[in-house]
Image (spheres, rainbow, N blue to C red):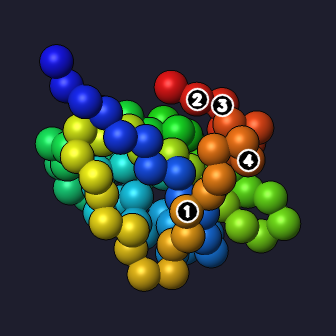
Amino acid sequence: MTEWTLCRWHGAPETLAAALRELGWNGPGETPAIPLDPRIGGFLPPAGEAPRECDGVVYAAIVANAPLPRPPGIAETGPELSAALLGSF
């Protein structure tokens, strides 16, 4: 059985989008630039959808089968705020 880790991140729109793209996510109307990272089980928002934005900050969650290092410029989002803005897996 696979153990899953939920990474809840937020940051500036371009910074977070770049971090997600490095894992294989793509934004609306984009073609994935790289294959999906094998550690990734899914994204909130899903690939092809824009990250949720509130007051100029964007939020996303990633489910992975291993801990992911948080990229520079990205902060961890608390579970309650993440669930309220994004829902959950």
Distance between mark 1 and mark 4 Cα atoms: 11 Å
Looking at the image, can residue 28 be seen? no
Distance between mark 4 and mark 2 Cα atoms: 11 Å
Of residue 28 and residue 77, the one placed in the foreground of this image is 77
Q: Residue furthest right?
A: 55
Circles 1 and 4: CB distance less than 8 Å?
Answer: no
Q: Which residue is mark 4?
A: 81
Q: Secondary structure at mark 1?
A: strand
Q: Which residue is depicted at the point 73% across and 56% down?
A: 53
Per the rendering, the mark at residue 88 is: 2
Q: Earlier in the sequence, mark 1 or mark 4?
A: 1
> In the picture provided, is 22 more to the left or to the right than 54?
left
89 over 44 or under it: above or below:
above
Q: Name the residue type under label 1.
A: Glu
Q: Which numbered disc, 1 or 3, marks the residue closer to the eye?
A: 1
Q: Secondary structure at mark 3?
A: loop
Circles 3 and 2: CB distance less than 8 Å?
Answer: yes
Q: Position of residue 82 (x, y in %)?
A: 66, 45
Q: Which residue is mark 1?
A: 76
Looking at the image, can residue 11 be seen? yes
75 over 77 or under it: above or below:
below
Of residue 19 and residue 9, the one placed in the foreground of this image is 9
Q: Which residue is mark 3?
A: 87
Q: Which residue is depicted at the point 62% across and 74% down?
A: 12
Distance between mark 1 and mark 2 Cα atoms: 15 Å
Q: Earlier in the sequence, mark 1 or mark 3?
A: 1
Q: Secondary structure at mark 2?
A: loop
Distance between mark 3 and mark 2 Cα atoms: 4 Å
Q: Quadrant of residue 40?
A: top left
Q: Residues within 10 Å of mark 1 (few under 14, many from 20)?
A: some
Q: Position of residue 15 (x, y in %)?
A: 51, 75
